[in-house]
Image (tube, rainbow, N blue to C red):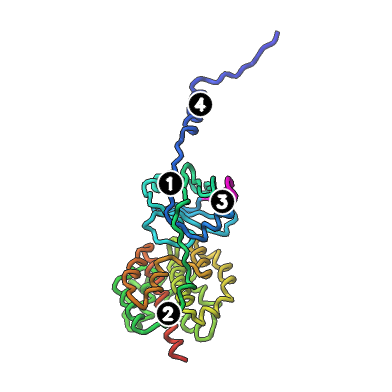
Amino acid sequence: MLHLHVQCMPVSVILPAIMRNMVISMVPTYTCKINQMDGRLLEWMRQQSIGEPIGVVHSVFDKVVNFTTDDGTMLFSLAKNEVIQSPSMMKTCQNDYFSKMCSTIMLTKSICLIDYNLLKINDWQWDFSNAAIWNRNIKPHCQAKQKPTVSRLRLLNNFILRHGATGGIYAAWKSFTYPDWEVPIATRKNIYFSPFLEGLEQLKDDMKTDKFDRFFDNFAGLGMGLTPSGDDFLTGLLATWQYFKSPLYKKMESCSEKWLQRLKGRTTTVSYFMLKQCLEGQVNEALLNVLDNIDGNPIPHLQRILEMGSTSGTDMLTGVSVAYQQLIDLKEEK
């Protein structure tokens, strides 16, 4: 006699499984619009295979989501429209949808192109078919510009003193720029004050002797946050050197690859790519606008850059200030 041994599954187990499948199949897919996009990012996406993963979610914030490619060679982002345009960034005006997506998105989740102009992130599709293309870099904006002047430097420094964030590299920059300033005891005790001040003083000496291999290490990765203050300072400094075609930048270009290799283990992923892009002539729009308008009316642009992070905008402006002073000094030596 044949006995069949059947394992019975309770209805209470079967139904939830069915319901779960129904819920999964019924999850709505939202299609949202990207209104602006870095042209270099668009060109890169055009080279990717449709239907294949192009990267993973790296980090999620209230206004920005960052992604990295699977091979780790590139970082790009999607942000709310109010965020300052930066290299490899897409932006959207649909803030509500963006916030809803951020509340459900998971780190390391793969993202992919599902059509020629359609990017899928979780259950959210982002259409960039009508996105305005942003395509700016440093080099095309340095033609026929006036040379740095003492009056423009004074305006910049006064703005930083009056409106700059007092954290980050600010106190060290102020002490370096205005040696007669009596530094408060509490400021001197800050763990970053002395390293930043020593780095600025060393930078001044190194530039006189063309020692470009060392100054980068004094600032790279120094500070706290997504982009440490030392990296923001370097971004402002290097961008200004490039913009005015400083001989200082031409001399340090040979060190850039070596710098980037050392930088990988010293700072955050986001900050690493910010400096990498800067060395390639790509920086955020606010910094470009400061450099473009410093000979005219820079105040609105100086105010705009201060909106970056808690101290990032100020730290970048201190880099512009130090580079500006160096360029004036070089001009006077000739």
Q: Amino acid at mark 4?
A: Ile
| Crowd class of label 2 (few under 14; some 14 to 19; many from 20; radius 10 Å) | few
Is residue 109 found inside the magenta-colored segment of the image? no
Tags 4 and 3 touching, CB below 8 Å: no
Which of marks 1 and 3 precedes in the sequence?
1
Q: Amino acid at mark 1?
A: Cys
Along the viewing direction, whichever of 142 and 88 lies nearer the viewer: 142
Cα–Cα span, label 3 and label 2: 40 Å
Tags 1 and 4 touching, CB below 8 Å: no
Along the viewing direction, whichever of 284 and 160 lies nearer the viewer: 284
Residue at image mark 4 = 18
Residue at image mark 2 = 145
Residue 32 image position (x, y, % from top left): 43, 46
Is residue 52 found inside the magenta-colored segment of the image? yes
Residue at image mark 1 = 32
Residue at image mark 3 = 54
| Crowd class of label 1 (few under 14; some 14 to 19; many from 20; radius 10 Å) | some
Does residue 70 lie above or below 6 as drawn? below
